């Protein structure tokens, strides 16, 4: 059975059970501060389980793209080494939001597997929660008895809290789980060891395929459990594992989910799958990782050095490194696999087909960049090896190579092993642990339970129309982190504060109590459908009616910048072409940042045209035309632009200024004239095919233009109030260029004279042309002079010292043949001599340099140089 049919059968089965089939949410989480990526099918339904929103449908099913790079079985460094774990995978799931519970969930799971898919019951095992003394929970007898209706009792196994109790996080909805496992071993193997002995033992052919979670408790901050008033079902089935079972394979990678990618890898690299273990692991790593990276990029997450972008870069670099090391690929090739993924999965996930070109460009650029890093790392590792005092290489040095240059530690260990050296891995692990602890400590935070003051069905946002209103506090909790200290999160019955989202930062402002006391709101965010107001203090009277006031100037500047991003988007399409798509944005009161697809640098003339286009719309004084609760399909049909990677509801908000017409939930000016003026301050590359423009409006634009005016007036004074200051500056530049030429000529003449003098001063010491002396030259001139003399004098051992700007410089040149014959190493010698000038250095076997802060030590250093040839 083809994988597409398996997916289709699952969705049709649950459709027949009155489930609403919904599309997959983007894999990249944009408005959930607790998650970087969608790591489970239930993520997009969290707010329903938490009771913070009312679900439109109480029965839901879908296939969800997920990304896991850490956790129970999904450590990134292990993916590819077995045949059934992945970074990105599809999770088939069905949910009940306060509707059916254990009986139906169990019955339908069994029906789908054994009747619809005809999996033999004798190959299946199920687990139920055995109970937990610490949590004071009994064995899940209800699930156990329900399973007995479908499967022999000896195939119902008890599972512990680790395997059979699911939790959303440290706090929140949770409950016991029933896992369904399948045994796909041969009859001979089954006769030797019963399948029940291999369940949850990480056996590659006895694997969990479906997890049925019965959400019936709420985990409190103190660790206790409370019964939920409404009980829910959350299931997740590994699509790739199910395909393995249905296609009679022994590995997920042998199914039609992965084989087209693997076959393309074989074609491109000339490697053969299922030939050697190392090659197989490398091919599996690449096949898995290219899917994860492609879908992340298609959903809007570009590789970068921080946050979610760093995770994507790390996954891609691991794939590149495996290709480099084990498939001998020294040129970019992984980007060529995106077309296979697009053809294979584009029907189910159209975003991968739409963003195929972008994915290819970004991955190719990342590949080329990291391959250069690998080359650089190989040179640096060679230098570390040359400087080593023993056969064991320092773990600290290896960590620097890993941390600063991204050079993989296993590649370092492999190269050292080939050279007969070893790595102090304990030292490396110690440095890595210190770094992780620093990161953990910085990010660590704890949250108390919500204190409920009054029941309120749903918090209402009124900030589009009001910046001030009367509010009541419905709940609050205390949060604490090492980075920010103690803070309070406040939720009101209604609020004018806009929460961070859609690229726009959250509002600031204050609460005023009836007695005049103020509580300042320092940020506003949205989490699980709650608008959370962050403050350093609690109001004195928690039950009072407060006047909530948004900082008007903060909001106006943010709104001006947000409206300007819409006009900028329109301008880019108008000037550069219809291929331009928004790839990300940041709207801050002080500036705006806009990322967009474009194949080349935007020229100065084009930037001027873009600026003029936006400012023309500002000067036209276009009124805002806003649509609220517009059906999504109707808005798109009317021409509104929907941004890629965003998940829209059934109804949307539309924002229109003239011909600029977009779906947007942010705050905006009521008329474009309020933007005042639009000024681009920078244009740069973000990734291959993605450019970034940063710009300012309103107050920031006024400040910028005032500063420019002040600088221009200061410049005029510098050129003595010339009537033509630009021409005066140009004359100064020409004069400066001429003086530089004259100085360079003088330097050359000085160096030539120095060469003649040095050549005459050379001494014969044990058949070596030796000289150690001071010169009045900079480092570049010392090197140039050394190499000139080397071309004219054989058996040369030249040590030069110089004092420049209060610092000491040393250089050593040793004739290459001489270095080899006498086993001399300029790099090691310069480190010894560098101690005299309180500095250090390094270099190659034949040429090395050092710098130090003690020029008075030059004489001793030069004197000591002779000892190496005596």
Image (spheres, grey):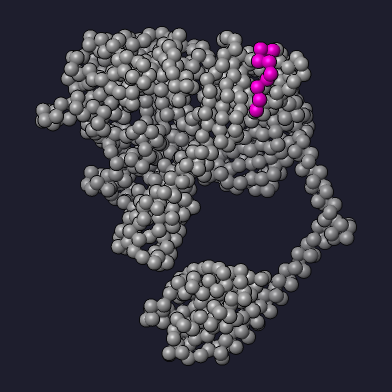
Q: Position of residue 368 (x, y in %)?
A: 45, 51
Q: In the image, is 344 to the left or to the right of 629?
A: left
When the figure is inspected, residue 501 is found, relative to residue 684, above or below; the finding is above
Which range is magenta? 536-544
Residue 540 counted in the magenta span: yes
Residue drawn at x 19%, y 22% as measured from the top left: 123
Q: In the image, is 16 to the left or to the right of 481?
A: left
Residue drawn at x 73%, y 71% as measured from the top left: 738
Q: Position of residue 173 (x, y in %)?
A: 44, 18
Whether residue 556 is visible here, answered yes or no, is no
Residue drawn at x 53%, y 15% as measured from the top left: 52
**Quarter holding the N terminus?**
top left
**Quarter holding the C terminus?**
bottom left
When the figure is inspected, residue 867 is found, relative to residue 36, above or below; the finding is below
* Quadrant in the rendering for residue 244: top left
* Quadrant in the rendering for residue 252: top left
């Amino acid at each position: 059975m083809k994988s597409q049919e398996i997916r289709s059968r699952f969705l049709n089965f649950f459709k027949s059970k009155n489930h609403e089939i919904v599309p997959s949410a983007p894999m990249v989480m944009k408005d959930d501060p607790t998650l970087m990526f969608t790591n489970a099918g239930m993520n997009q339904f969290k707010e329903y389980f938490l009771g913070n929103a009312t679900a439109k449908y109480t029965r839901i099913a879908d296939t969800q793209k997920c990304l896991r790079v850490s956790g129970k079985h999904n450590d990134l460094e292990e993916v590819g080494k077995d045949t059934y774990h992945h970074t990105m995978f599809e999770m088939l799931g069905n949910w009940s939001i306060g509707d059916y519970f254990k009986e139906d969930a169990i019955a339908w799971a069994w029906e789908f597997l054994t009747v619809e898919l005809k999996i033999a019951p004798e190959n299946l095992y199920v687990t139920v929660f055995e109970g937990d003394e610490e949590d004071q929970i009994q064995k899940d007898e209800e699930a156990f008895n329900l399973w007995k209706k479908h499967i022999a009792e000896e195939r119902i196994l008890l599972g512990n809290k680790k395997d059979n109790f699911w939790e959303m996080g440290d706090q929140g909805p949770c409950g016991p789980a029933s896992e369904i496992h399948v045994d796909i071993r041969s009859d001979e193997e089954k006769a030797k060891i019963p399948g029940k002995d291999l369940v949850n033992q990480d056996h590659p052919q006895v694997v969990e395929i479906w997890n049925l979670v019965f959400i019936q408790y709420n985990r409190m901050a103190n660790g206790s459990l409370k019964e939920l008033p409404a009980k829910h079902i959350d299931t997740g089935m590994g699509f790739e594992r199910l395909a393995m079972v249905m296609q009679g394979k022994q590995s997920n990678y042998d199914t039609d989910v992965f084989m087209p990618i693997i076959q393309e890898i074989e074609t491109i690299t000339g490697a053969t799958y299922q030939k050697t273990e190392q090659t197989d692991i490398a091919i599996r790593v690449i096949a898995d990782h290219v899917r994860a990276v492609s879908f992340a990029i298609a959903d809007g997450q570009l590789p970068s050095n921080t946050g979610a972008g760093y995770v994507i870069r790390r996954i891609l670099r691991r794939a590149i490194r495996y290709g480099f090391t084990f498939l001998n690929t020294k040129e970019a090739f992984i980007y060529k696999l995106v077309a296979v993924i697009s053809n294979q999965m584009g029907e189910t996930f159209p975003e991968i087909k739409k963003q195929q070109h972008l994915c290819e460009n970004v991955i190719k650029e990342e590949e080329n960049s990291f391959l250069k890093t690998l080359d650089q790392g190989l040179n640096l590792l060679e230098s570390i090896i040359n400087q080593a005092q023993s056969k064991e290489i320092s773990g600290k040095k290896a960590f620097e190579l890993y941390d600063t240059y991204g050079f993989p530690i296993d590649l370092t260990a492999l190269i050292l092993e080939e050279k007969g050296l070893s790595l102090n891995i304990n030292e490396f692990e110690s440095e890595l642990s210190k770094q992780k602890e620093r990161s953990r400590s910085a990010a660590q935070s704890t949250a108390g339970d919500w204190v409920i003051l009054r029941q309120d069905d749903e918090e209402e946002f009124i900030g589009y129309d009001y910046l001030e209103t009367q509010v009541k506090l419905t709940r609050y909790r205390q949060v604490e982190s090492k980075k920010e200290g103690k803070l309070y999160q406040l939720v009101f019955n209604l609020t004018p504060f806009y929460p961070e989202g859609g690229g726009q930062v959250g509002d600031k402002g204050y609460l005023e109590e009836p007695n005049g006391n103020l509580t300042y709101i320092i940020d506003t965010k949205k989490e699980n459908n709650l608008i959370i107001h962050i403050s350093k203090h609690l109001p004195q009277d928690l039950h009072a009616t407060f006047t909530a006031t948004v900082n008007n100037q903060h909001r106006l500047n943010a709104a001006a910048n947000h409206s300007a991003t819409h006009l900028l988007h329109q301008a880019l399409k108008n000037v550069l072409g219809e291929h331009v798509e928004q790839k990300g944005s940041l709207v801050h009161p002080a500036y705006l940042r806009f990322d967009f697809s474009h194949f080349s640098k935007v020229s100065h003339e084009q930037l001027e045209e873009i600026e003029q286009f936006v400012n023309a719309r500002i000067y036209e004084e276009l009124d805002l035309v806003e649509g609220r609760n517009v059906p999504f399909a109707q808005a798109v049909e009317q021409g509104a632009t929907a941004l890629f990677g965003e998940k829209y509801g059934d109804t949307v908000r539309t924002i229109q200024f003239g011909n600029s017409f977009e779906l947007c939930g942010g705050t905006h000016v009521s008329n474009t004239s309020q933007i005042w003026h639009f000024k681009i301050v920078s244009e740069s590359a973000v990734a291959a095919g993605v450019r970034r423009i940063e710009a300012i409006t309103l107050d920031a634009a006024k400040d910028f233009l005032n500063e420019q005016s002040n600088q221009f007036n200061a410049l005029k004074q510098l050129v003595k109030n010339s009537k033509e200051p630009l021409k005066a500056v140009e004359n100064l530049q020409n004069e400066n260029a001429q003086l530089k030429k004259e100085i360079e000529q003088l330097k050359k003449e000085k160096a030539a004279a120095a060469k003649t003098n040095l050549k005459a001063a050379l001494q014969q010491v044990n058949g070596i042309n030796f000289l150690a002396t001071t010169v009045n030259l900079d480092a570049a001139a010392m090197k140039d002079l050394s190499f000139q003399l080397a071309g004219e004098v054989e058996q040369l051992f030249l040590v030069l010292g110089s004092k420049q700007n209060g610092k000491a410089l040393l250089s050593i040149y040793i004739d290459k043949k001489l270095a080899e014959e006498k086993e001399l190493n300029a790099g090691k010698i310069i480190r010894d001599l560098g101690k005299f000038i309180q500095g250090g250095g390094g270099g190659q076997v034949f040429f090395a340099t050092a710098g130090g802060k003690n020029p008075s030590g030059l004489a001793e250093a030069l004197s000591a140089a002779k000892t190496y040839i005596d």
